[in-house]
Image (cartoon, rainbow, N blue to C red):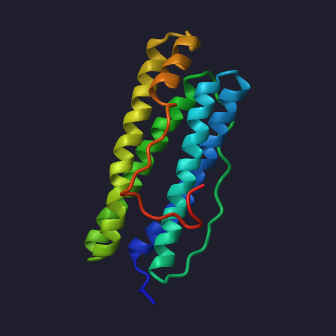
Amino acid sequence: MTEFTKFHQLLHDQIGNEFYASQQYIAVATYYDNHDMPQLAKLFYRQAVEERTHAMMIVQYFLDRDMDVEIPGIPAPNNKFEDYKAPINLALEQEKTVTQQVVDLAKSARDTGDYLGEQFVQWFIKEQVEEVAIMTTLQTIAERCKGNLFDLENFVEREFNGPAADDPTAPPVAGGNI
């Protein structure tokens, strides 16, 4: 059995962070569904599944390393938003937070000489660059539309809600992709 290090503790904590992000995105998607914005709802429902998948990738990593893994509880997500821009702002801040968590994971793996862990985390670093870029663009467009939600919905449909491409470099997912 593999020795449990500080890196592994941070990685274990990241399972909870990813599940929390998934729940928060469900709350955001539901907000948009409740306000008749189906394209934003679709984007965030898909983001919720993606965050869950990230958590399950980490679970699979522990299983592959023959390490015990426990699924943590998570805090309740924010369900109340002042306007259509607030969930996007929250999502951007959440992605920036997750990015720092992933950077901390990579640093911890490197500092402890865990080359397998460092290699595993590299995919998540690449993923976070993409996630922050998407949310930053979404925030910019939400500001530019100045309340014209039809334009915002059209942009999201055109730019973000096309068919998702599989990433062959992605780590395996416990239970398989769903």
Residue 13 visible in image: yes
Q: Residue at x 55, y 67 (%)?
A: 174
Q: Residue extending furthest right?
A: 34
Above or below, 143 relative to 6: above
Residue 108 visible in image: no
Closer to the camera in the image, 45 or 94: 45
Residue 90's spot in the image, x, y percent? 53, 35
Above or below, 104 relative to 31: below
Q: Residue at x 65, y 42 (%)?
A: 26
Picture quarter containing residue 138?
Answer: top left
Above or below, 134 relative to 48: above
Left or right: residue 70 compared with residue 138? right
Left or right: residue 171 compared with residue 26? left
Q: Residue extending furthest bottom?
A: 1
Figure quadrant of the C terminus: bottom right
Closer to the camera in the image, 13 or 142: 142
Q: Residue at x 55, y 81 (%)?
A: 68
Residue 72's spot in the image, x, y percent? 62, 66
**How many numbered markers are drawn?**
0
Q: Residue at x 70, y 28 (%)?
A: 33
Residue 147's spot in the image, x, y percent? 55, 11
